[in-house]
Image (tube, helix red, strand yellow):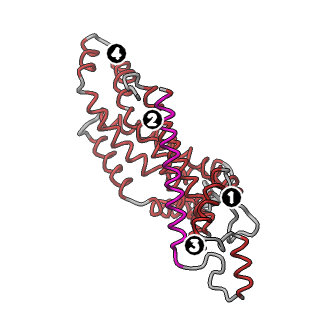
Amino acid sequence: MWRYTLKRLVQGVITVWFIATATFFAMHNVPGDPLLNDKNVTEEIRANLEAKYGLDKPIMQQYRIYIWNMIRGDFGISFTQKNRSVNDIIYSHFPVSAILGILAVVFAGLGGVLWGALTALYRNKLPDVIIMFLVILGISVPNFVVAAISQLTLVNVNNLLGVSLLPIAGWGGIEHMLVPAMVLGLGTMAYLTRLMRSSMLEIVSSDFIRTAKAKGLPPTRIFTSHQLRNAILPVITVLGPSIAAITTGGFVVESVFAIPGLGRYFVQAVQQSDYTVIMGTTVFYGAFLVFMVIVVDLLYGWIDPRVRLE
């Protein structure tokens, strides 16, 4: 187990290094000037700006400096936000994205397991047909469309009731988080529902389920201890990438609902060609994804002792 864990960690480090390298050279091949933004300045000012951000050095030397700073946890200074480091942006705004992401993951995970199990129990019946129709909608419709429809619905409901039932945008208490979290987790919940349904249908026809029924075990115990526990394993397998997908998918949702999360700053950095913020957040999210995949691999082996990770 320890050998496998160490091997996965080494693979994770190599993956993060590849992400950082690809991001660095990709950003240095993007047309335009990240410092001047088409402003008419003198050559002296340009030289001073390049010296300040290390852009006057050869690209391989810049790359070595960037990798060394990244190893030390220093992603540099923002090009557009005066005297603000990328680390400060991440530390200040990732907790907001994390809170929103955790709520979305809880909503998606619980909903996916619940609706998936329900559709399997009522296979080819009315609940199954209705839920699967909604699942197809949830997978097909982009989250920015769902976000816009949700805001419009909230406006109409608030106007109809004459009170602000839930805030339309902004960030503060739990009431600000509910609708964005549901919008953010809706697509993942739909995918997990379909996965859980397929897994449940496969488990129901297994030999050990028939044996449990022949032994006279109560249906509730068969469902919770044998069907649900075994059917949930594929859901757990994709939960790590789903968490990262929800977190990165929050870029659009945070912009629509005016949430001051890290995704919103990433979108602004792309619009303003803020290379250091783009590279820093990309590497940070890449490392987060790798970490979650490793955690899920280890968790999978812990939940199902039959799995031998080695």
Residue under circle 2? Answer: 297
Circle number at residue 160? none
Q: Magenta segment range? A: 3-31
Residue picked out by circle 4: 218
Nearer-the-camera pick, 103 or 56: 56
Mark 3 surroundings within 10 Å by alpha-carbon count, few (fewer than 14), some (14 through 19), many (20 or more) = few
Label 4 Cα neighbours within 10 Å, binned few <14 / some 14-19 / many ≥20: few
Mark 4 or mark 3: whose residue is earlier in sequence: 4
For mark 3, give the secondary structure. Answer: helix
Tell me which amino acid carries mark 1: Ile
Q: Amino acid at mark 4?
A: Pro
Q: Amino acid at mark 3?
A: Gln
**Residue 168 appears anywhere in the view:** no
Q: Main secondary structure of the magenta part?
A: helix
Give the SS element for disc 1: helix
Closer to the observer: label 1 or label 4?
1
Picture coordinates of residue 211 (x, y %)? 25, 15
Query: Which residue lies under the disc numbered 1?
Result: 89
Tag 3 residue: 271
CB under 8 Å between callouts 4 and 3? no
